[in-house]
Amino acid sequence: MPSKKELRIGLIGTGFMGRTHSNGYRRVPNFFPDLLHTPVLKTVCSRNAEKVQAFADQWGYESIETDWRAVIARDDIDAIDICTPNDMHAEIAIAAAEAGKMILCEKPLARTVAEAQRMVDAVEKAGVANTVWYNYRRIPAVTLAKQLIESGKLGRIFHYRANFLQDWTISADVPQGGTGTWRMDVDAAGSGVTGDLLAHCIDTAMWLNGAITDVSAVTETFVKERMHALTGKVQPVGIDDACIFHCHFQNGSLGLFESTRYARGHKALYTFEINGEHASIRWDLHDLNRLEYFDHGDEGIVRGWRSIHVTDGDQPYMDKWWVPGLGIGYEHSFVHQAADFFSSLDKGAPCHPTFRDALETQKVCEAVLESATSRSWKDTGVDTFAGFNKELV
């Protein structure tokens, strides 16, 4: 076997996503042994030295930093992984690109289209490998949905509908800002459920069904004022608690999307359904190893929804894991994305979604927010030639 080429990782941010990415890197060599590149957890960065050292000890990073600029300046770092709040993505990514580092960035790419465009310009000028962690593409059942659509089994697509429902911010006592609740602070997050949750739905939708061309949206902020965790002052809330929008896809199909943090009883209900001329498919994150499939071509007496248990070795990614019938979980989507990034380096090819791909998702998010504000239809400006529905893993 050829010798492995080390890819030395500098992780910036030690929150929830820092853990998922670290777990992904740790598992890749075990389950994807044929890759020519292998990760080395070189350093991890966060402001609090004691906490970042504990994180490094837990996940096996060789060293720590408390200033992200020091990570980028190091000669022993090949790739920067950005797991910070959204307001730091652009500055870190642009600096990393100018230093010639590869970049893996958490979603959404940025707070605004303008920020995202600067990031795209920087990585493309520098010619550095880049990707954005829209991990739901890498759940085997979702990738199988992509393959079924590309095979033509659904025929012409008529409808795409998705939702992402949570309930963790219903209490007015939940603060905005700070380490645990920065997603509630518009300055740090850029938006609420639109950038945090609907961005996932939009990325998946355009990957499966092509470009979204225009949108009409409604948003609501149910709690108008919250205490800021850092200042202790009560101030207006600038993020959206809930969003509903409908849209047109370039292929002529209609889309319907809903997201909220005010759906009591739902912690992370993410579902999508696609209705085509010949067949339909639907998927639910709560049962992520299954893809439901309806084929109108079946004989009438047995026609109905069937449940495909996506665990066989000939289904996406599953040949890397256990034996048929044994499922995998949420965390494996990050293992798959890390593996796909290393595989792209092996092949000298882009790892989708790239920054440019994620810019298109950002355009839809911004159009949604503008539509809700103006109470009018908005064109997304998405590049309809980007080939969303042609790019297979």
Image: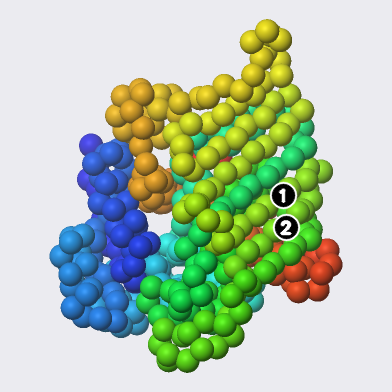
Identify the residue at horizontal 50%, vertical 52% (top origin).
Answer: 266
Left or right: residue 25 compared with residue 81: left
| Residue 220 x/y as whole percent | 67, 69
Identify the residue at horizontal 36%, vertical 32% (top origin).
Answer: 327
User: Element type at marker 2?
Assistant: strand
- Above or below: residue 370 compared with residue 146: below
- Above or below: residue 344 compared with residue 65: above
Which kind of residue does numbered mark 2 sit on? Phe
Front residue of this view, candidates 287 and 52? 287
Front residue of this view, candidates 117 and 268? 268
> Can you see residue 227?
yes
Identify the residue at horizontal 46%, vertical 54% (top origin).
Answer: 267
Count residues near mark 1 (Cα–Cα under 10 Å), then give few for <14, some for 14-19, many for 20+.
Answer: some
| Residue 107 x/y as whole percent | 50, 63
| Residue 140 x/y as whole percent | 46, 36
- Above or below: residue 302 compared with residue 363: above
Identify the mark at residue 245; answer none if there is no mark.
Answer: 2
Which quadrant of the structure image shows residue 194?
A: bottom right
Residue located beneath label 1 in the image:
256
Q: What is the quadrant of the N terminus in the image? A: top left
| Residue 184 x/y as whole percent | 51, 74
Front residue of this view, candidates 181 and 362? 181
Identify the residue at horizontal 77%, vertical 37% (top origin).
Answer: 158
Front residue of this view, candidates 23 and 36? 23
User: Element type at marker 1?
Assistant: strand
Tags 1 and 2 touching, CB below 8 Å: yes
Check the image and name the residue furthest to the right. 376
Left or right: residue 27 compared with residue 184: left
Distance between the Cα atoms at labels 1 and 2?
6 Å
Which quadrant of the structure image shows residue 379?
A: bottom right
Which kind of residue does numbered mark 1 sit on? Leu
> Can you see residue 91?
no
